[in-house]
Image: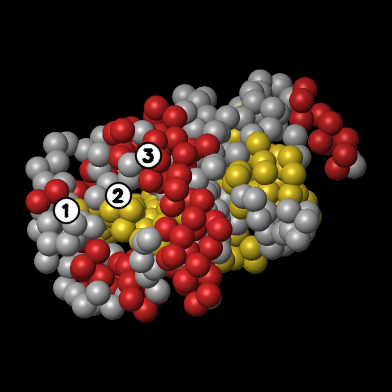
């Protein structure tokens, strides 16, 4: 049967679950977003319903585009070939440098929106980005009760009471690729070299392991991200739930009693979930200091002004701008804030000083950092 005919018949498949063997699931390339999934629970393929964000899907690769590799549950980037079967999760994508994508309304052919394992439909793409890799959903993954297996099923449970809240530093920025993760990892490196125990998190973004591995490699004792609380992607997530889940991530880190928590919020200040979280009183109350990552001086000035309008505790700025001495000088003059190079952030004598408030010798929230 020609493939286009098979695709057309997806909409009229009977509402009878198709049994799927453990061998078939084992042979599929499983993406990073599925790393918490218990695949022993999966027994069927379901083709009688529309997908929802976080639903797991078994799909066949139809053509190779922008994402020629998929990151697996162990962090290895595995080459994709036409005809491969993969296990990914449905989700929206917000990536100004790549794709704007949404969850499709049916199980028809769609796209691989991210190498960490996001299935969706491309709405728009950056001019420099190749067309997306195309995939054919073979069915949503179902359990023994006929329910779709969703990532939320494997989310960390709500933690108990936190006896001590560590000093918490946030890294935010102008946009994706402004240097946030590099700054966060450099800061983690400096703090751990100083003998401090660091917990780290990424609260929002699109499921992928690169930032997690970077923070672990820098020396963080524990790293959590939004996939640990059941998200393939946080774009278009319910705002109240996202606040609750973000606080849960920070609480899980705090239970391990690190000296410092460093967390990153993805994308830029104008992205809806980033803006919402930084404006939420519940999260603001947890932030002791912010380092702002920017690509240029005007972006630094505008972003710093945005944060100051919300009375957030800015310590200074970093990011790609610090590779330009002239751009850095412009931003320092315009904002009155100091810049932090990657060398400074990773320096064990310098990094612990950022655990102090901007008021010289007053320690943040009267907690000890060193």
Residue pictured at 39% horizontal, 36% vertical: 279
Q: Which residue is mark 3?
A: 310
Q: Nearer the viewer, mark 3 or mark 1?
A: 3
Question: For numbered disc 1, what is the local secondary structure?
Answer: helix
Asked if the residue under mark 1 is in contact with the one under mark 2, i.e. CB atoms within 8 Å, the reply is yes
Judge whether 52 appears above or below 344 on screen: above
- Which one is in front, 176 or 355? 355
Asked if the residue under mark 3 is in contact with the one under mark 2, i.e. CB atoms within 8 Å, the reply is no
Question: For numbered disc 2, what is the local secondary structure?
Answer: loop
Judge whether 355 appears above or below 62 on screen: below
- The tag on residue 313 is 2
Residue pictured at 54% horizontal, 56% vertical: 299
Q: Is residue 191 left or right of residue 202?
A: left
**Quadrant in which the C terminus is drawn:** bottom left
- Point out residue 243 in the picture as x, y percentages from the top left corner: 36, 34
Q: Earlier in the sequence, mark 3 or mark 1?
A: 3
- Point out residue 303 in the picture as x, y percentages from the top left corner: 48, 51
- The tag on residue 364 is 1
- The tag on residue 347 is none
């Amino acid at each position: 049967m020609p493939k286009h005919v098979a695709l057309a018949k997806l909409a009229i498949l009977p509402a009878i679950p198709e049994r799927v063997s453990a061998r078939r699931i084992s042979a599929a390339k499983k993406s990073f977003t599925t790393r918490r999934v218990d695949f022993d629970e999966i027994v069927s393929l379901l083709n009688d319903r529309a997908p929802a964000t976080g639903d797991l899907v078994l799909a066949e690769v139809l053509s190779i585009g922008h994402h020629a590799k998929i990151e697996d549950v162990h962090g290895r980037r595995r080459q994709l070939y036409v005809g491969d079967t993969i296990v990914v999760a449905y989700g929206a994508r917000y990536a100004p440098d790549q794709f704007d994508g949404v969850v499709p309304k049916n199980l028809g052919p769609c796209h691989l929106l991210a190498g960490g394992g996001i299935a969706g439909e491309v709405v728009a793409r950056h001019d420099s980005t190749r067309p997306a890799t195309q995939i054919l959903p073979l069915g949503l993954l179902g359990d023994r009760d006929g329910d779709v297996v969703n990532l939320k099923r494997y989310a960390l449970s709500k933690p108990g009471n936190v006896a001590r809240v560590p000093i918490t530093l946030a890294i935010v920025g102008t946009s994706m690729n402004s240097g946030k993760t590099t700054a966060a990892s450099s800061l983690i490196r400096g703090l751990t070299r100083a003998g401090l125990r660091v917990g780290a998190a990424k609260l929002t973004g699109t499921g992928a392991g690169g930032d997690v591995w970077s923070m672990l490699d820098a020396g963080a004792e524990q790293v959590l991200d939004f996939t640990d609380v059941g998200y393939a992607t946080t774009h278009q997530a319910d705002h109240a739930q996202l606040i609750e889940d973000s606080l849960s991530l920070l609480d899980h880190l705090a239970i391990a009693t690190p000296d410092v928590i460093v967390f990153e919020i993805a994308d830029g200040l104008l992205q809806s979930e980033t803006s919402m979280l930084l404006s939420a009183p519940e999260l603001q109350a947890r932030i002791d200091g912010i380092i702002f990552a920017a690509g240029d001086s005007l972006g630094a000035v505008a972003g710093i002004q945005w944060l100051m309008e919300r009375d957030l505790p800015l310590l200074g700025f970093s990011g790609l701008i610090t590779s330009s001495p002239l751009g850095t000088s412009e931003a320092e003059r315009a904002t009155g804030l100091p810049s932090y190079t990657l060398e400074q952030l990773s320096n064990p004598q310098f990094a612990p000083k950022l655990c102090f408030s901007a008021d010289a010798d007053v320690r943040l929230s009267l907690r000890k950092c060193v």
